Image: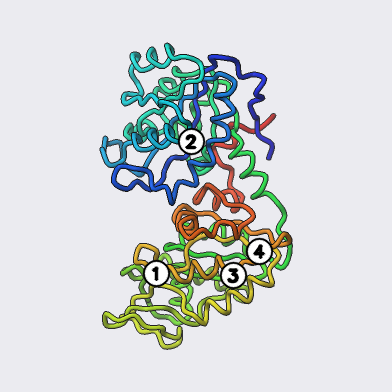
Amino acid sequence: MELKTLPLSQVKRGTRILMRVDCNVPIKSRQVDVESDWRLEQTLEDINAYLQKGAIVILMGHLGRPRGLTKLSLSLRPVARWYEIKLGKKVLFIKDVVSKKSVQKVAGLEPGSVVMLENLRFYPNETFNCIWFSKRLARFADIYVNDAFGVSHRRHASVKNVTRFLPSYAGSILVNETKELSKKRVSPFVFVLGGIKLKTKMPTLLMLGREADEILLGGGVAVAVVSALMNKVFQINGKNISRRELSLARQAIKKFKTKLVSPIDFICSRNGKLQTVLTLNLEKEDEILDIGPSSIKLYSASLKRAKSVVFNGAMGSLDSGAMSGTEAIAKALSISVSQQAIVGGGDTVGFLQKKKLLKHFKFVSTGGGAMLAFLAGKKLPGLKVLKKK
């Protein structure tokens, strides 16, 4: 897919650029968690390029799911402060993104200024893809740039309809994502699929499963498949696998029986004590937390043979502190020139950044759901409107 990009020659001194960024990052004590700020780091290249041309850059994004309510804990002020530190300049924070006064304030700024709009999801109009809200956002600028691949699968006002009111372009993040995720995967291709819920992963599993040589399962995805295979309902993260998940697991087994590789052991909490339990010996009361040591060895051997790897979703419940499986699988990748390894998913990438393991991957996607949707062959609304004609 070829996207429209903004030539720097078109960026003049004083040009106002409305830039959608993915700032949905962990906040701790009202500060961006610098161990998980990888998504924000990726936006700096384009921002600095525009600032060097004398543009006024107006950043907009979201944090969490406030569902149209104003919540102090989800304010983007910490993100504005993060940008101030990284860019070495004052960032004007706009609390009211729909008022004329805010637009006038931005219009009076000097070339090379930076602005951060408050969390767009404080307004229900954002997630409704509201025309009125899109127009209000467009009033801030002369040009729109989408540099937030992670939300490009959403039909939101700042992603889709805003492009109706401004000349619109894809930022370098979108261009790199589509280029890397579109590359042909070389055999042997291993698809590592984890995460808590199979239903969010199923479309991608159906698509990538066809070309994968092996599909290594972890997390709730693995628990759903094991539950279907053993005709028992097991639990992860303290919750039983649902009927819907079981149904999807049976579909996956039927379609990819020879390719699916489920764990042969798990780390479980049994009677309040952590134990390694063989899959065949699992009991309904066991709370599954992570893949076990034998599974890690099995999966690692497959990964060392692989030429292409797509890794999406944690192998265990990171919320419960079950990290060993995800960490070991990342370490198993060879970091060789010949291996094309891609990882995506906010929680997984954030965890790997903290562990300094992102170097094991040739490409790190800024999207979780967007990456899955793209790999599943879906047309992403945010990309469709920026497609080069």
Query: What is the secondary structure assignment of the residue under circle 4?
Result: loop
Q: CA distance from mark 3 to mark 1?
A: 18 Å
Query: What is the secondary structure assignment of the residue under circle 3?
Result: helix
Q: CA distance from mark 4 to mark 2?
A: 33 Å
Amino acid on which disc 1 is placed: Ala
User: Which quarter of the rendering shows the N terminus?
Assistant: top right
Amino acid on which disc 3 is placed: Ala
Q: Earlier in the sequence, mark 3 or mark 4?
A: 4
The image shows residue 345, relative to residue 386, as above or below, that is below
At horizontal 54% and vertical 24% (from top left) the residue drawn is 51
Q: Which mark is residue 210?
A: 4
Circle 1 residue? 322
> Where in the figure is residue 178, as x and y percent of width and height?
64, 44
Q: Earlier in the sequence, mark 4 or mark 1?
A: 4
Circle 3 residue? 332
Q: CA distance from mark 2 to mark 1?
A: 30 Å
Q: Earlier in the sequence, mark 2 or mark 3?
A: 2
> Where in the figure is residue 277, as x and y percent of width and height?
41, 85
At horizontal 57% and vertical 66% (from top left) the residue drawn is 192
Q: Earlier in the sequence, mark 2 or mark 1?
A: 2
Q: Image quarter for residue 84?
A: top left
Image side of residue 188 versus residue 79, left or right: right
